[in-house]
Amino acid sequence: MRRLASPLLFILTIILAACAPATTPSLQTDPQPASVSTTSAPSQAEADGLTRIDQQGAVIVEVTPLNLDAPSDQLEFDVVMNTHSVDLSMDLATLATLTTDTGVTVQATLWDAPRGGHHVAGKLLFPATNDGKSILEGATKLTLTIVGVDAPSRVFEWDLGG
């Protein structure tokens, strides 16, 4: 029995060493970029002047318009959502509206992103026209509202300088 104890102990040590992580786990949480406000105030502007950030609840949502200066038939927005506790499998096209200060409101037409997970990035598309007229025509302010993403409402605003 004693003859078997040493080899078994050696084999057990090898197995445990092979299964152990190569580095010790860090107690540090994911650092936030310096440009992101740690307050829960919605719609904070990033350094580039276009990205807006909302940090309500357990989900951080970043929205950047891609073609406000030269819209085609669609207005495109990059949307990045990050969390460690909420499933992000929702279809943002059903939860997002775009409104101008001239009173025009349109529903998103497509959320082009992978479904699910805790770190999701994609494109949110809206029609650029309503009744044959550009929704940006005459507008000086644009508001994107997203409801139901771990907060009742997230509001992102841009001045169009019109």
Image (cartoon, rainbow, N blue to C red):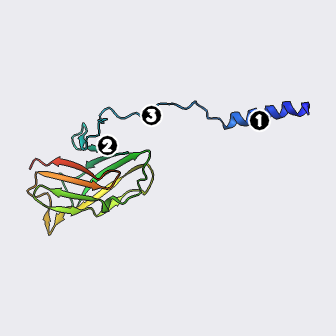
Going by the numbered disc 2, the residue's amino acid type is Gln
Q: Earlier in the sequence, mark 1 or mark 2?
A: 1
Query: In percent of the image, x 27 and y 61: which residue is there?
Result: 108
Q: Residue furthest bottom?
A: 131
Does residue 73 appear in this view? no
Mark number, residue 25: none
Q: Position of residue 15 (x, y in %)?
A: 73, 37
For label 3, the SS is loop
- Residue 134 placement: quadrant: bottom left
Q: Is residue 52 left or right of residue 90?
A: left
Q: Is residue 22 left or right of residue 41?
A: right
Going by the numbered disc 1, the residue's amino acid type is Leu
Q: CA distance from mark 1 to mark 2?
A: 47 Å
Disc 3 designates what residue? 29
Going by the numbered disc 3, the residue's amino acid type is Thr
Disc 2 designates what residue? 55
Disc 1 designates what residue? 12
Q: CA distance from mark 3 to mark 1?
A: 33 Å
For label 2, the SS is loop
For label 1, the SS is helix
Q: Is the residue marked by circle 2 packed among few (<14), some (14-19), or many (20+) residues within 10 Å?
A: many
- Residue 23 placement: quadrant: top right
Q: Earlier in the sequence, mark 2 or mark 3?
A: 3
- Pointers 2 and 3 in contact (CB under 8 A)? no
Query: In percent of the image, x 17 and y 57: which residue is there?
Result: 99
Does residue 123 appear in this view? yes
Q: Position of residue 50 (x, y in %)?
A: 22, 44
- Pointers 1 and 2 in contact (CB under 8 A)? no
